[in-house]
Image: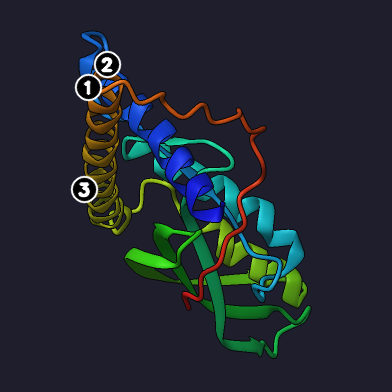
Amino acid sequence: MKRSVIILSALLCSVMFMRAQDAEAAPKIEIPLTAYISAETDIMPAAESLLLNRMRQAALKNGLAAVDNQPYIVTTSVNVIDKQVTGGVPAKWVVELEVHFFIGNGVDGTLYASTALNRKGIGESEQKAYLSAIKAISASDRAFKPFFEKGKKRIIEELEALRALEEAQQAAENENENAGVAPSDPSPADEQPLEYNFNWQ
């Protein structure tokens, strides 16, 4: 059942992908991608919404559509490389972060692309310095372009393979109908939140 949900969700992505290809007014292919941060990821809570917004903005800038509950995700992890307190008055915190970004199939755990950015932040507290470093990440950062291009290419390859599988299954069903075999009538299922299972760091 879980595999069926994955395939169904991916095929819904495929439909949107093919429509974008066929639409004369759509010069770019938009592939649904979910910006996601796992509850197990060690990220300062106040920074999560900032990072989610940055990932959505970067995805949109690079021809992907920010859509919830898709098997394909962009996610992140943050490592604190260094933190210091300056000796001035008033004292300031300086925090250096290594922020990793990943694109992949969050359901089956397949990683497609990754990149990392180093940013420093300064603030009156450790939290403010941390947030300052996160705010220094731009959706237009030049590292994002090859990152999203690589991820998009891998997603398109998987969607094309799934579409070929769907066409083969449809052809087999047509042959069965011609042979007098009654087609299966799967009951419609309500869309359920996907369960992500990945370990990218």
Residue 124 position within the rendered picture, expressed as x and y whole percent measured from the top left: 76, 72
Q: What amino acid is at disc 1?
A: Gln
Instruction: Please tell me whether mark 2 or mark 1 is closer to you in this view.
Output: 1
Q: Report which residue position mark 2 lands on.
A: 26
Q: CA distance from mark 3 to mark 2?
A: 20 Å
Q: Nearer the viewer, residue 89 or 185?
A: 185
Please give the label number shown on residue 21. 1
Colouring used for the render: rainbow
Instruction: Please tell me whether mark 3 or mark 1 is closer to you in this view.
Output: 3
Residue at figure coordinates x 32%, y 54% from the top left: 144
Please give the label number shown on residue 157. 3
- Residues under numbered marks 3 and 1 in contact, where contact means CB atoms less than 8 Å apart: no
- Residues under numbered marks 2 and 1 in contact, where contact means CB atoms less than 8 Å apart: yes
Instruction: State whether residue 88 is above or below residue 136.
Output: below
Q: CA distance from mark 2 to mark 1?
A: 7 Å
Q: Earlier in the sequence, mark 2 or mark 1?
A: 1
Q: What amino acid is at disc 2?
A: Ala
